Image (spheres, grey):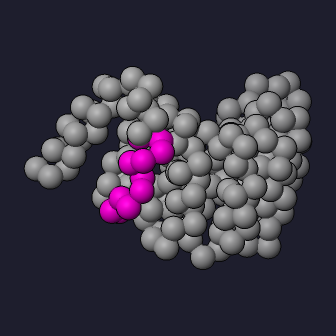
């Protein structure tokens, strides 16, 4: 019941896209908001693509609550990182302390950002000594199809001795369309 009411409130707020409402949402609404209100505000920011709220949402990436940080990352994924890529990379550099879904969302957001620093972070993470983080980064490269180095990294990962790495690369390669994939994929047939 409460969740349904919250969704109705979010929907009602989202219908008001007048400049003064957008300004209030971006500048004033976040001040002193409770965690549940922050969640609602981030949902509104996503639904109306409130890029003006990006600085407020980005600032939540440093929140004490992992739930808030995770939700803010999801919101940033939808409204974009804009000029705030450095803050997201700083968070990503300390990613080991966060849960799997958060790690994946951060890497996906960085890969999808199109920003050179974000993409470089994801590419460097594909060689991490932590197997799980490495496979997450390879999975995120599906969102960086525009980068030649993404394809080359995934093709190289098909030759890795670890099957987890090969599987992550193969899953990401399904997003690419390039004839250079054929020979490595055929070479991978039957490899365990």
Q: Which residues are magenta?
A: 25-35
The residue sitting at the left extreme is 1
Q: State the residue at coordinates (57%, 66%).
A: 62
User: What is the count of numbered marks?
Assistant: 0
Q: Nearer the viewer, residue 105 or 178?
A: 105
Q: State the residue at coordinates (65%, 69%).
A: 95
Overall secondary structure of the magenta section: loop
Give how far across and how far down residue 171 sits, in percent: 66, 44
Residue 122 in view, yes or no: no
Compared across the picture, whether 49 is left or right of 87 comes to left
Give how far across and how far down residue 148 sits, in percent: 88, 35
Q: State the residue at coordinates (52%, 42%).
A: 53
Q: Is residue 28 magenta?
A: yes
Q: Nearer the viewer, residue 59 or 114?
A: 59
Q: State the residue at coordinates (50%, 54%).
A: 72
Compared across the picture, whether 100 is left or right of 94 comes to left
Compared across the picture, whether 175 is left or right of 64 comes to right
Q: Quadrant of residue 192?
A: bottom right
Looking at the image, is 116 positioned above or below residue 23?
Answer: below
Residue 124 in view, yes or no: yes
Give how far across and how far down residue 98 sits, in percent: 56, 71
Give how far across and how far down residue 47 sits, in percent: 41, 33
Q: Nearer the viewer, residue 160 or 16?
A: 16
Q: Is residue 156 magenta?
A: no
Looking at the image, is 93 positioned above or below residue 31?
Answer: below
Q: Nearer the viewer, residue 92 or 140?
A: 92
The residue sitting at the bottom extreme is 97
């Amino acid at each position: 019941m409460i969740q349904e009411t919250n969704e109705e409130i979010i929907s009602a707020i989202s219908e008001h896209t007048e400049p003064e409402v957008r300004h209030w949402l971006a500048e004033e609404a976040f001040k002193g908001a409770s965690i549940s209100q922050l969640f609602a505000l981030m949902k509104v920011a996503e639904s109306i693509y409130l890029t003006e709220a990006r600085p407020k949402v980005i600032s939540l990436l440093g929140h004490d609550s992992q739930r808030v940080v995770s939700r803010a990352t999801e919101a940033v994924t939808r409204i974009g990182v804009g000029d705030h890529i450095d803050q997201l990379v700083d968070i990503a550099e300390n990613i080991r302390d966060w849960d799997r879904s958060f790690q994946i969302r951060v890497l996906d957001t960085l890969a999808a950002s199109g920003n050179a620093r974000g993409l470089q972070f994801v590419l460097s993470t594909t060689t991490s000594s932590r197997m799980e983080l490495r496979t997450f980064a390879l999975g995120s490269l599906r969102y960086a199809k525009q980068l030649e180095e993404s394809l080359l990294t995934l093709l190289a990962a098909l030759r890795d001795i670890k099957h987890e790495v090969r599987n992550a690369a193969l899953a990401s390669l399904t997003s690419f369309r390039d004839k250079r994939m054929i020979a490595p994929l055929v070479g991978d047939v039957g490899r365990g």
